Every structure is written in C-alpha cells, then in structure tokens.
Amino acid sequence: MYKHLVVAVDGSHTSENALAHAVGLAKVENAQLTLVNVANPAEYMALAPEFLQHESYEAAALAEGNTVLDAAEHRAQAVLGEGKIQRHLLMANKGAREMAQMLVDYAEQQGADLLVLGTHGRSGLMHLLMGSFAETVMRETRLPLLVIRSERSEEEA
C-alpha cells in the first residue's frame, strides 16, 4: 500500500514515537523511509547568546538538526538496514507555517505516499512563538497523514 514514507523528526519524545510507527510500517510495507528535520534558527534566538556554542543561530540549528537525523537514522537502520533510508535537512527562517509548508512540499516532491509526524515537539514559550507545526501540516497537505499523539502525561508536563 505504501511505497515511500516521510517522517518528520525533531528529537522530542513524540517524534520518537512517530519514528517508531513509521519504521514499523516501512518494514511491513517494504517501503522507502525518508527522515526529515526542519531546522529553524529562530528557535535558538529565544536562548541567551551566552548559551549559543556555535558561530550563528543558523549553525546551531543545522548542528542540532543533523544530531536529530543521526539518532533517527541509527534507530531506523537497526530495524530496516541501510538500503531503505534517506535523510534530509530543511532550513526554515520563519514560524510553523513556513516549516510545515516546506515539509509538505518536500514530501510531495519526493513522491511520498504517507507523511508521519508527532503532535508535540515544542512546549511552553516555543509553542507560543512557533505555533503548532502538526496543525499547520494537517491544513496544508493533500497527502495521507499519520499523526501520532503524545501520551497524556507528556501533554500535562
């Protein structure tokens, strides 16, 4: 049924749950899996400059995005092996709407037939500033979408 799944990963607990679902589905369907992280330097601007250990906010976002992709790729390879996994890092400069649109556009351009993501990756101030990524993806995509909700205890935290 599915030949190419695109899963958004951001390193959050819910993102890891979404990845686990996508990996399991890709294994059952013998499908290609593409891991995507949408890096956003604006997320690092909320931090005090003294906490920034990179030459720029963009460098910090790229480094974190690659770290998240490395971990996700390692988890996926443990189940699928190396031949069925791709990874891609997107760079957004605005809020959740641009990030979501970039993910949707990328998935469509790659011929994905299912988009997988978690409902929560940000909380508190970052959620207020960046908005709801999953909500925006739901509004923008025409692809089938598998949204993995966070556990109740995680939502309350």
Image (cartoon, rainbow, N blue to C red):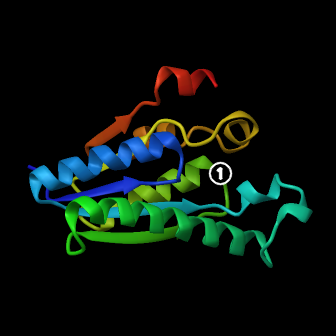
Q: Which residue is mark 1?
A: 95
User: In which quadrant will I find the C terminus?
Assistant: top right
Residue 10 seen in the current view: yes
User: Image height check: is 122 above or below 51?
Assistant: above
Left or right for 142, reference 153: left
- Residue 24: % across, % down: 22, 48
- Residue 58: % across, % down: 71, 72
Give neighbour class at mark 1: few <14, some 14-19, many 20+ (Cα, 10 Å). some
- The residue sitting at 8% across, 49% down in the picture is 1
User: Image height check: is 109 above or below 143?
Assistant: below
Among all residues in the image, which is located at the extreme front?
78
Left or right for 56, reference 117: right
- The residue sitting at 47% across, 39% down in the picture is 14
- In depth, the one of 138 and 118 nearer the eye is 118
- The residue sitting at 90% across, 63% down in the picture is 49
Left or right for 96, reference 53: left
- The residue sitting at 23% across, 64% down in the picture is 111
- Residue 43: % across, % down: 72, 55
User: Image height check: is 114 above or below 146?
Assistant: below
- In depth, the one of 30 and 93 nearer the eye is 30
Type of the residue with mark 1: Gly
- Residue 71: % across, % down: 46, 63
Give the tally of numbered discs.
1
Residue 108 seen in the current view: no
- In depth, the one of 46 and 138 nearer the eye is 46
User: Image height check: is 15 above or below 48?
Assistant: above
Instruction: Locate residue 148: give its quadrant.
Output: top left
SS for dot 1: loop
